[in-house]
């Protein structure tokens, strides 16, 4: 079982989630031409620290909640697991993605 980053992260990438992950399993990538992050399902220990950090609520606690994005996180992992960390955006920076709201 792994936490999963879902569509709300597309075009946002605040990256604060990656700074709290104790096992460094959150990685930046371009997806559908936009900035995105994924969680490596093989390394995630489901500690839950990242979920409340995401300003737009783009992290979910189980693969069952969004199987399509769980698949995307898994499939993109090999391409970005060695990528350098993404720069962090301030948590109060207004969301860029239409429909996203600051929730944390
Ligand atoms: S904090 Fe949320 S929006 Fe930012 S990179 Fe992590 S999952 Fe994406
Ligand atoms: S649940 Fe824990 S181990 Fe998994 S991505 Fe979030 S912070 Fe990292």
Image (cartoon, rainbow, N blue to C red):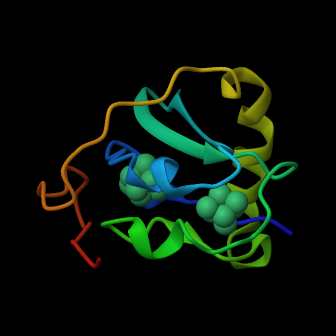
Please provide percent x and percent y for residue 54.
Answer: 39, 65
Residue placed farthest to the front in the image? Answer: 22
Which quarter of the figure has residue 6? Answer: bottom right
Quadrant of the rendered image containing residue 102: bottom left
Point out residue 52 in the picture as x, y percentages from the top left corner: 44, 76
Of residue 57 and residue 89, the one placed in the foreground of this image is: 89
Query: Percent position (x, y) of residue 79?
Result: 72, 22
Question: Which residue is at 49% across, 32% downward?
Answer: 32
Q: Number of labelled discs? A: 0
- Residue at 74% of width from left, 34% of height from top? 77
Q: Indicate which quadrant contains ligand 2.
A: bottom right
Asked whether 53 or 7 is in front, the reply is 53
The residue shown at (32%, 48%) is 14
Q: Is residue 99 left or right of residue 69?
A: left
32 and 14: which one is in front?
Answer: 14
The answer to whether 17 is drawn above or below residue 101 in the figure is above
Would residue 81 be found to the left or right of residue 74 on screen? left
Image point (76%, 66%), residue name: 67
- Camera sees residue 76: yes
Q: Is residue 4 visible?
A: no
């Amino acid at each position: 079982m792994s936490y999963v980053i879902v569509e709300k992260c597309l075009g946002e990438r605040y990256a604060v989630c990656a700074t709290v992950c104790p096992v460094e399993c959150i990685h930046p990538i371009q997806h559908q031409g936009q900035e995105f992050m994924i969680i490596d399902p093989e390394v995630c220990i489901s500690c839950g620290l990242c979920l409340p950090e995401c300003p737009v609520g783009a992290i979910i606690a189980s693969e069952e909640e969004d199987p399509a994005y769980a698949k995307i996180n898994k499939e993109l992992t090999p391409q970005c697991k060695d990528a350098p960390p993404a720069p962090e955006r301030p948590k109060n920076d207004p969301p860029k993605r239409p429909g996203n709201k600051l929730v944390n």
